[in-house]
Amino acid sequence: MTAEKKNKSKLYIVDEDILPEAIWKTAKAKELLAKNKNLTVNEAVEQVGLSRSAFYKYREGVSPFYEASRAKIITVQIHMNNIAGILSACMNEIAKAKGNILTINQGIPINDIAISTIAFDTMEITESLEDVLEIIQQIEGVYSIEVIGRN
């Protein structure tokens, strides 16, 4: 990629199901290397069935969503039952992961469904953002959670 084109590059969020195999395997190899500091690149690419050349070709351009979200403000929208304690449980999960909640906005419930928007800083987050969102999604009474903004 030329320097001029690199400066104009855009980031996309792409479902892993549609990624070409080499890019998906590069992401998996990077994940293995991040989790096990004693693992070599050779060992990681061998475990996922990828060539070293493909790994080195794609490694700079492939990052999991949670890595891209480090040191950023993430805004999520949560649809939930209008029952006491659900919003608090969602905020507790963010706090447990060391997310710093900056703002909370909850509209008046309609048809017993409340919509809350929470913005939080991910600078000190200790878990992957995907894991935090998945835990919140599984809270009883939460219908959906969606990332609606990143700064």
Image (cartoon, rainbow, N blue to C red):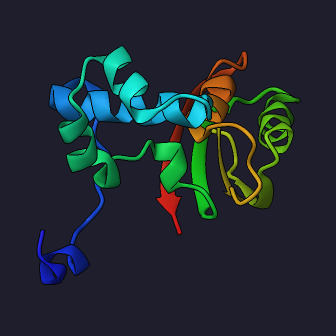
Direction bottom: furthest residue: 4
- Position of residue 138 measured from the top left corner of the image (x, y, whole percent): 65, 18
Say if 78 sits above or below 1 in the image: above
Could one spot residue 148 in this view of the protein?
Answer: yes
Could one spot residue 113 in this view of the protein?
Answer: no
**Residue under the point 27% across and 30% down:** 24
Q: Is residue 100 left or right of residue 42?
A: right
- Position of residue 141 measured from the top left corner of the image (x, y, whole percent): 70, 20
Say if 40 sits above or below 48 in the image: below
Foreground pick, 131 / 112? 131
Q: Is residue 84 left or right of residue 10?
A: right
**Residue under the point 32% across and 19% down:** 46
Find residue 10 and report its image quarter.
bottom left
The N terminus lies in quadrant: bottom left
Say if 122 sits above or below 50 in the image: below
Find residue 29 and report its image quarter.
top left
Foreground pick, 2 / 92? 2
**Residue under the point 58% across and 49% down:** 76
Say if 141 sits above or below 24 in the image: above
- Position of residue 70 measured from the top left corner of the image (x, y, whole percent): 60, 57
**Residue under the point 68% across and 28% down:** 136
